[in-house]
Image: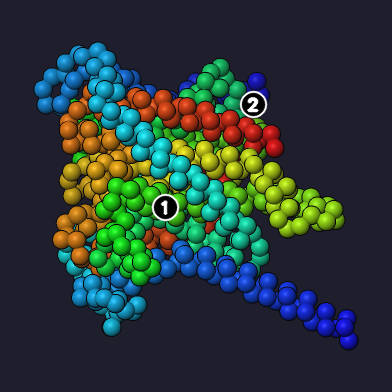
Amino acid sequence: MGFQKTRARVKLRRFALFASGQFGLLALTLLWLLPYAWMVLTSLKTLPEIVAAPTRLFPEQLQFGAYRSALAAMPLGRYLLNSTITALGIALLQLLLALPAAYALGKLRFRGRSLAFGLIVATLLVPAQLRFVPIFSLLAELGLTNTYSALILPFAVSALGSFLLRQALLSLPDSIIEAARLDGASEFAIVFRLLPPLLVPSLVSVFLFSFVYHWNDYFWPLVMTTDDRVRTLPLGVALLREQGTGARWHIVMAGNVLLSAPVLLVFAFAQRALLRAVAASTS
Amino acid sequence: MSGLRPASRWDPLWMLAPTLLLLAVFFFYPLLVAAKDSLYAWDLLTPPRYVGLDNYRSLLEDGSLYQSLKTTVGISVVVVAGALSLGLALALAANRPGLLAAWLRGSVFSAYVVSWVSVGLLWLWLLDADAGAVSRILRGLGWSQPGVLTHPNSAPVAIALVVVWKIAGYAMVVFLGGLQSIPKSVYEAAALDGASQFHRFRHVTLPLLAPSLAFVATTSLILSFQAFDVVRVMTQGGPVRSTTLFVYSVYERLFLDLQVGTASAEAVVFFFVLVLLTGLELWAFRKRERA
């Protein structure tokens, strides 16, 4: 009897531990999910609803008025296009430049290799926040502010991308390249035709990391552009608030949903690839 | 030196030339120009005038360098402490199988993926003095101040906590990696020795996680030294300059005051601070490698 009682008690204790653990997990998750939920709910409300006290959790009826106002307040299509061009341009250019550089640094033997590698890695020391003053005055002299070039070219070289692709190449056996050479493949063909299929996971990681990073970027477009024709979505959404009289939060949150939804979608579908880039950037 | 012999001696050159050229134009040249500009007084309109070290002197004498350093260090301390403790707590909570734990990992890390502008605007709304949800909850709990972002004492803390909320997922991912590399046998041995759960954490987990801790500490330190978007979106450096972080201060000098010289001088100082911090990071990284 006594033995069974203890067993029941142990079982109960185990269950309590498990339940409280799960409850704790849920509470922690909500700390991150609730703000997002609030953003979406706010964007579906009307102005009287969001300033009412006490606030209701859910809108009385689904409203898309805030989205319509956000679209009317800014050339959203233009911003979306500019963000896409910029982020895509940077990500593709980075891969295009990093691939041959990583091949030379990871597979070839030549004088000055460690110097070149060191110079590339050293750029991690020089973030955009440090470069913008002279680059701004340089581009201003060349008349290149307010152009896509001003948004894309300063980021065409990615130390992280070159580094990651080099790492991936180091674990690739030399014999693959030697065999291709024996078959008469040019170095150009090796770099741009033989290697890419072998490096898909790393290429995808670098591409997604770079795309998301520059899609999100606010600082560089802010300091390099004043013209709506090249300005990007984060600037537009931030402007929604600066234009407003302060209380139009439903419109700002509608813009915010439009800004963050694409990134969250990429994250949902490519979590593994993004995490690999983050993990690699830390080691 | 290992590696294949290049097919032609010019191969490494064409492969690296575009990269190195762009590095020269967009990384090394700007540094030299910043160093040069820092010795001139220039408002972008009239021709620059050589002033020697006057820009540095005025940065020191008017106390603005000290001010932005102090603000940046203050916020960084909260960010680093928050990222370490919250990141570790999250990693310990999420380091288990199951759907809820996976949800936790995903939702916390998503904040790191979303833009600083999104996060800044979201929290600006949550903390809105009149209708913000968090402000209302705080008021319900008896907090009588009008709004956390309107007071110079609470605004920097609020900014730091928003940064922590955003980067906690990054810290969590690093710590999860660290936790998963600790062999199970170590815990089993400790359990056999009769170590309690707390003792196992204190004497097994923490020491073995030390390299990850050092790593997260230095990366979040560098990150908070480079913070700009969140300040620009949420407080514009105010109230009374209480959130004027380093980069925001440089930005203000250039675009609001049109002082290229002082902005450059401040950027040069910033560069050396970053070199110092990165040295610290490399040191922490080496320690992690060795572990």
Q: Which residue is mark 2?
A: B3
Residue at 63 percent of width and 26 percent of height: B4
Residue at 73 percent of width and 48 percent of height: B204
Secondary element at tag 2: loop
Q: Residues within 10 Å of mark 1 (few under 14, many from 20)?
A: some
Query: Residue B59: x, y in percent?
Result: 27, 24
Residue type at numbered disc 2: Gly
Q: Is residue A36 visible?
A: no
Residue at 47 percent of width and 64 percent of height: A31
Q: Is residue B48 visible?
A: yes
Residue type at numbered disc 1: Leu
Quadrant location of residue A167? top right
Closer-to-camera residue (A165/B143): B143
Q: Residues within 10 Å of mark 2 (few under 14, many from 20)?
A: some
Quadrant location of residue B256? top left
Q: Which residue is mark 1?
A: B161
